[in-house]
Structures are given as structure tokens and as C-alpha cells.
Amino acid sequence: MASIGESDAMIDAARSAFRNFVENDWLTITVVEQNGQVAGWAARESLDEIISDFWIDPIFTAQGLGSALLERIEKEIAEQGFDKAAMQTHSGNAEAIGFFQKHGYSIHWLSVAYNPKLDRDVPSVGLTKQLVSDGRGYGQEF
């Protein structure tokens, strides 16, 4: 368990990383709103198949907004020619893992790696979802 000072430093590092991301990568962010209020957002920093960020404000969970946002991001990924979507999250984030699994994602790896934005090792899981049929199936293809 982290000490109070260490936790504060981690929060400050996360806030700084978020501010920097929003200022420099805003074109990669998709926002979902409800009644004019930002309810969540997702991003694809490299505009590839990787969903680099996905967040729904806790007061807006279980209202279908996360599902709508994910559907929009997956549509963009598929329209840009990628056949799968991928993302990673903290391995202890059971709620996020469950959300993505409910939407067809499968866990493909578990890792502990240094995160320079947070200045610490972070345990993560990687999840992927096939968006476009790979054409393989049973029997003759027509």
C-alpha cells in the first residue's frame, strides 16, 4: 500500500499526464455527453486499433453511455480498415474488464510494466475484440 505522500504524488502525476494529453492529443478524443454534460470520453492516441483511453464518469455508469461510446469508437476503428480493437487496463480494474468482456473482448495478456507518466510499475491486462470477420468458418465459403 502506498503512503499518503506517495499517493498524492501519483495523483498529481496522473493529473499532469491527463492535462498534457488533452492539450496535445485532443483530435483523438471522442466525448459522450448527457444533457450537455460530459459523461465520458475515449481516445485513440495513434489513431490505430488501440483504444488508449476510456472513461465514464461514475455518476453516468449503467445508463448505456459507455456502450454507445464503445460502439462509436469500434465503428471508427473498423471504418479505418482495422479488423480488431485492442485496449489495456489495470489488472485490478474488475469493473472495466467486465465491461469490455460483456462487449465481446477477450483477455490476451497480463503484464507488469513501468509507466513513465505515472512513474511506477503498473500491472495491466490487454483485451482484444475481432470487429470484422476473418472469413474463416466451417464448410465452403460462398
Image (cartoon, rainbow, N blue to C red):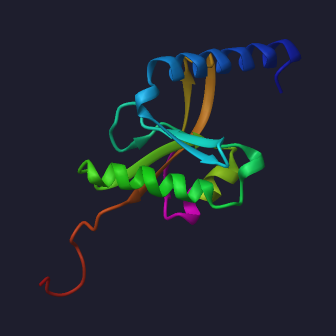
Residue 7 falls in image quadrant: top right
Residue 79 appears at what percent x and percent y?
28, 53
Q: Nearer the viewer, residue 24 or 131?
A: 24
Specify the quadrant that holds the N terminus: top right
Residue 110 located left or right of residue 98: left
Residue 139 falls in image quadrant: bottom left
Q: Residue at x 69, y 44 (%)?
A: 92
Q: Nearer the viewer, residue 24 or 13?
A: 24
Residue 102 forms part of the magenta stretch: yes
Specify the quadrant that holds the C terminus: bottom left
Q: Does residue 108 show up? A: yes
Q: Residue at x 37, y 55 (%)?
A: 75
Q: Residue at x 35, y 44 (%)?
A: 49
Residue 7 located left or right of residue 32: right
Asked if residue 117 is positioned above or below residue 97 in the image, the reply reads above
Asked if residue 142 is positioned above or below residue 73 in the image, the reply reads below
Residue 106 appears at what percent x and percent y?
49, 59
Asked if residue 56 is positioned above or below residue 25 in the image, the reply reads below
Residue 100 appears at what percent x and percent y?
56, 56
Q: Which residues are magenta?
A: 100-109
The residue lying furthest to the bottom in this view is 139
Residue 119 forms part of the magenta stretch: no
Q: Nearer the viewer, residue 69 or 119?
A: 69
